[in-house]
Amino acid sequence: MVDNLLLVLVSFIASFGFALVFRITGRDLFLAALGGALTRVVLIILSGFIPARFVYVMLSALFASAYGELLASLRKDPSTYFIYPSIIPLIPGDLFYYAMTGAIRGNATLFSENAQACLLTLLGMSVGFVLSSTIAHYARKTLHSARRK
């Protein structure tokens, strides 16, 4: 439990730092960092119920992207303001590190396990973003055409 709270706090801080790099200011800075913390919460919850890495990462990415799209719409800001900081907790840096360590040391087991998990994570992120972007596109299109009538 304490480990999970620490992960959420670190995700908030990492997303906050990433948002600073994007020069996000004011209330948007807090909301962007909050997206990272909430994405970590979703990831922790889903990973406890869903054994397939691809699925729980995809759903977490779908959440992060939907969060970004919703806030962008409400705040009248670009969606990247909120999506990019929100996905920071999903980036598989540790898996990539251990895969490369296995490759360099000639440890095929370490390499294959971590490389496979890394690829599944990246694929899940990609599919989640594509789904969310597609849904957001058609939602905007539908709302726009409904307003014209």
Image: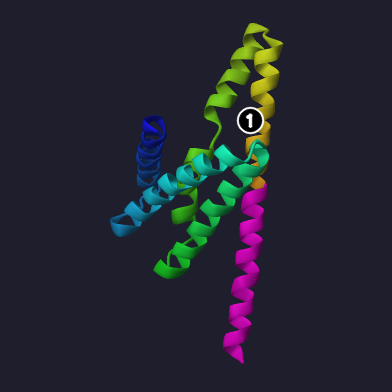
Task: Residue 91: say if magenta.
Answer: no
Q: Is residue 136 left or right of residue 23?
A: right
Which residue sits at x=40%, y=48%?
22
Kindly indicate the quadrant of the structure image that contains residue 117: top right
User: Could you say where residue 38 lies in the image, as x and y percent from the top left?
Assistant: 44, 48
Q: Left or right: where does residue 84 sit relative to residue 144? A: left
Q: In percent of the image, x 36 and y 50: which residue is there?
A: 23
Reply above or below: 126 against 146.
above
- Viewer-side residue, 44 vs 142: 44
Left/right placement of residue 17 relative to residue 108 reads: left
Dominant SS in magenta = helix
Residue under the image location 34 percent in, 53 percent down: 29
Q: Is residue 137 magenta?
A: yes
Image quadrant in which the N terminus is located: top left
Residue identifier under label 1: 118
Q: What segment carries the magenta color?
A: 127-149
